[in-house]
Amino acid sequence: MEHNTDTTPTKVHQDAKLGVIPDGWSTPKINEVFQFINTTSFSRDQLNYDEESDLYYIHYGDIHATYKKPLLDFEIEAKVPKLNSDVMLPASIQYLKDGDVIIADASEDYAGVGEAIEIKNLNGKAAISGLHTFALRAIDNETVAGFRTYIFKNPNVKKALKTIATGSKVYGISKGNIQKFKIVLPTIPEQQEIAQILATWDVATIKQEALIKEKQQQKKSLMQQLLSGKKRFTGFDKKISFVKIKQIGKVLSGGTPSTSNSEYWNGGVPWCTPTEITGLNGLMNIIQTERTISESGLKNSSANLLPRNSLIVCTRATIGACAINTIPMATNQGFKNIIPEINKIDIIYLYYTVQTIKPKMIALSSGSTFLELSKTDFESIKIPLPSLKEQQKVAEVLMAADNEITSLQQQLQKLKTQKQGLMQQLLTGKIRVKLN
């Protein structure tokens, strides 16, 4: 994507906290550019995602964790909670408008200090700003819609915001401090051009995300049809049998050596935990582990060394998450692991099949603190077992679908990286936009 920029050096001046300021840009205080409108402080248990009310609620936790784009577009974002209909609203309530900026005034880490979003496309919907937020509304036409959120993405502004945050476990910004806080403003024409350039990347990102979601749904449907036998490939018409997991391989549990004995740890045996499987984010293979145990730790615990190309399956807490190990490794007790008989079942076919039995695994699990599936119950679950050649054909098709999704995700990450680089350059004025 092309963008209209100019790398010609421009005159600059220096600000003590905000660094180099390009010629023509200003550094006003926030309260000279925005007015602070009233917010509320309702808690999570007063919110819902159903149709109980028509009043949307912007919670600071969602600014940190849910809304991944600088502009909260109500035509796109489906995860905006609503305030319960039985909640009494204060008389001082102020409803949000398009172009308002919402800033989270609290964060558990410095990176989240001053995280901001801009409201877009309310289209008649009612929304209010909530717990631990500041709501800003532009005054005097010094900013343009679509750019306001980026004021707080400027790396120099973000760095300066951290200097007014206080706290130890949770960092907070007071209203008194932020009102007098200085920001960096390009000229209005430059704001418009920068907003347009960055919006181009947002549109491309949204389209890419929609395409990925579509491909993921197609793959899910394909898995359900192929792994249930409802859809068969030409040349494969033999009736599919169903067998128990213990009939296609050896099932081994994991274990943890005593943590009080240092001789059991930091050895040559990779040792896997459930968080490492969930951390793969859908990737098929686990190629390394964060921690290792020694041969002595392996012998003096219930851990087992699994050969490469075993299926590592979480059966505690995150039940059903799985991966194929590309190197020999052991696991902790949160797993039931399958060493497959290669003349009976293809490991990649097994990987996809186990994903489809997750609901059955959960239904068979029990526990008060967290759910856990026993070895006996896991071994007794039945799975479809077509011929080895048909298994390999199914695995080939599903792998191709996964590879296509991975490629699209890599393209998406490239778009995000490009935009991040543009923001660094455009919002600080290191690269100036060309104005017609």
Image (cartoon, grey):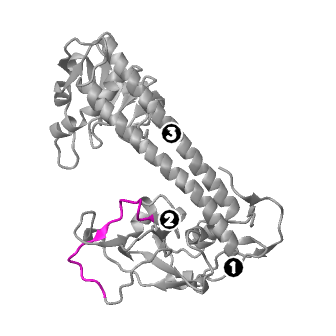
- Spatial CA distance of label 3 from label 1 is 40 Å
Q: Which residue is mark 1?
A: 27
Q: Earlier in the sequence, mark 3 or mark 2?
A: 2
Other-residue count near label 3 (Cα within 10 Å), few / some / many at <14 / 14–19 / ≥20: some
Where does the magenta region start and end? Answer: 73-90
Residue at the image position 40 percent from the left and 60 percent from the top: 77
Q: Residue furthest bottom?
A: 91
Q: Which residue is mark 2?
A: 71
Residue 215: mark in rendering: none
Is residue 375 rendered magenta in the image?
A: no
Side of 237 relative to 322 (left or right)? left
Percent from the top left, x then y, of residue 352?
A: 33, 28
Percent from the top left, x then y, of residue 55?
A: 31, 74
Q: Secondary structure at mark 2?
A: strand
Amino acid type, callout 3: Leu
Q: Earlier in the sequence, mark 3 or mark 1?
A: 1
Q: Which residue is mark 3?
A: 408
Residue at the image position 67 percent from the left and 75 percent from the top: 188
Nearest the eye: 310 or 50? 50
Asked if disc 2 and disc 1 are in contact, CB closer than 8 Å, the reply is no
